[in-house]
Structures are given as structure tokens and as C-alpha cells.
Amino acid sequence: MPKKRSSSSRSLPFAHYILGLLYTDLGDYRKAIVELELAEKKQIHEADLYYSLGQAYARTGRKSDAERARTTFRRLSAEASAHQDEPNIYGEQRPLRPDPSGQARSRDEVK
């Protein structure tokens, strides 16, 4: 009998995203894809997710899926630039513009 996921695991898209990143770091790209796709289905539409998904697809030979994820990553990255006042997937404020020193500056630091 297959293991049944608890209802709480299905309602935690961010947990699936983090688990997908962990599997990616461990080099287990097939498991990473499963978790990252679950996060995607649960409405996490952040550039970071699609970057990781694209890498996992590429590492498993899924070239067309990798290209789709990269295209989505580029689109979401461009959209994020237009919405810098909204928090990112981690709940952090997106930087408004890069500091000349190369470090991103938060909205509170920009006067």
C-alpha cells in the first residue's frame, strides 16, 4: 500500500519548495522535481522556484521542461523588477536597486 501524505503536507507549498532545494543540493534531482512541482501546483510562482526546477530538469535530461522553466524564470525575474515593493518567497523585502558596492539595498535603506 502506498504511503499516504498527510493533509498538512499538501497544504504547505513552501515546505515542498524547501525540500526540493534540499534534494537539489543532495543531487537527487528526481525527488527534487517531485517536490518543486508540488510547490508550483500550490501556487508558488517565484523566479527562484523555476530556476531550481530548470536545473533539476536539465540534470535529468528533460530538455524541453528545462527550457520551459528557464523561460518562466526569466519572465518572473523581469516581473519582480517591476514589483520590488512586494516581499519575495522568503518574506523578505526585494531590493530596490543595487548598491554601488555591489550589495543590494533594502527599501528602508534607500532614501
Image: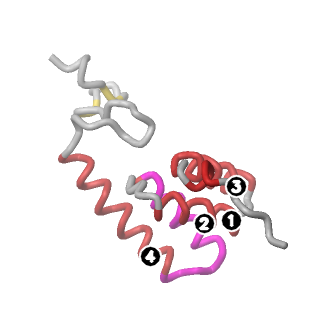
The mark that comes first in sequence, 3 or 2, is: 3
> Where is mark 1, residue-wise?
29
Q: Disc 3 on helix, strand or loop?
A: helix
Q: How many marks?
A: 4
How many C-alpha atoms fall within 10 Å of the one at disc 4: few (<14), some, or many (≥20)? some
Tag 2–tag 1 contact (CB < 8 Å):
yes
Are the two marked residues, 4 and 1, in contact with CB atoms closer than 8 angstroms? Answer: no
Image height check: is 31 above or below 9? below
Q: Which mark is residue 23?
A: 3
Q: Does the residue at mark 3 contact the one at mark 2 (Cβ under 8 Å)?
A: no
Q: Amino acid at mark 2?
A: Ala
Counting from the top left corner in percent of width and height, residue 49 is at 47, 55
Numbered mark located on residue 56 in the image:
2
Residue ID at (45%, 61%): 50
Residue 79 pos. (x, y %): 23, 54
Distance from Cα at disc 2 to Cα at disc 1: 5 Å
Q: Residue 109, percent across and down?
A: 25, 17
Q: Secondary structure at mark 4?
A: helix
Considering only order in the chain, which callout, 1 or 4, is on the residue closer to the N terminus?
1
Marks 1 and 3: in contact by CB < 8 Å? Answer: yes
